[in-house]
Amino acid sequence: MLFYSFFKTLVGKEIAVELKNDVVLTGTLHSVDQYLNVKLTDVQVVDKVRYPQLVELKNCFIRGSVVRYIQIPKGEVDTELLQDAARKENAPQGKGS
């Protein structure tokens, strides 16, 4: 759930999504779900020559299982918050839990 919570904080931000079939799309993150499926608005394909069929794409839903990478602007990453969340998620559980 760490990545889901993190990506929820990026809604409304510009991201780039590289798919497993080598297509790279940029756009504004509209929504993300617990399966890391993402919906982008204002979509643009990075390689317009190689993928001319995607030039007219404006909005898209991307299934999480086909995503290779999601690139986010460096300034959008709150490393303190991310490190704290990772520590909490990996903290040892008590015997009663």
Image (cartoon, rainbow, N blue to C red):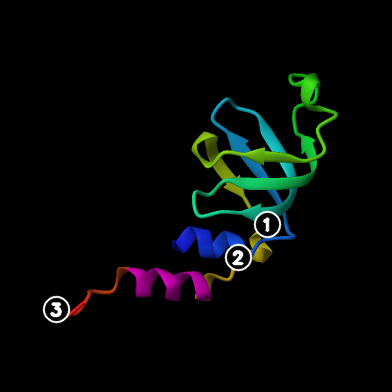
* Residue on which the image places disc 3: 95
Q: Distance between the Cα atoms at labels 2 and 3?
A: 34 Å
Given the image, on which type of amino acid does mark 1 rest? Pro
Location of residue 6 by image quarter: bottom right
44 falls in the magenta region: no
As helix, strand or loop, the secondary structure at mark 3 comes to: loop
Q: Could you tell me what secondary structure mostly forms the magenta stretch?
A: helix
Q: Distance between the Cα atoms at labels 2 and 1?
A: 7 Å
Contact between marks 1 and 3 (CB within 8 A): the answer is no
Image location (x, y in percent) of residue 23 = 65, 29
Mark 1 and mark 3 lie on one chain; the one further toward the N terminus is: 1
Q: Distance between the Cα atoms at labels 1 and 3?
A: 40 Å
* Residue on which the image places disc 2: 77
Given the image, on which type of amino acid does mark 3 rest? Lys
Which is nearer the eye, 60 or 80?
A: 60
Q: Nearer the viewer, mark 1 or mark 3?
A: 3
Image location (x, y in percent) of residue 68 = 52, 37
As helix, strand or loop, the secondary structure at mark 1 comes to: loop
Residue that appears at 58% across and 59% down: 7
As helix, strand or loop, the secondary structure at mark 2 comes to: loop
Q: Nearer the viewer, mark 2 or mark 3?
A: 3
Give the magenta range.
Answer: 81-89
* Residue on which the image places disc 1: 73
Image location (x, y in percent) of residue 10 = 65, 62
Given the image, on which type of amino acid does mark 2 rest? Val
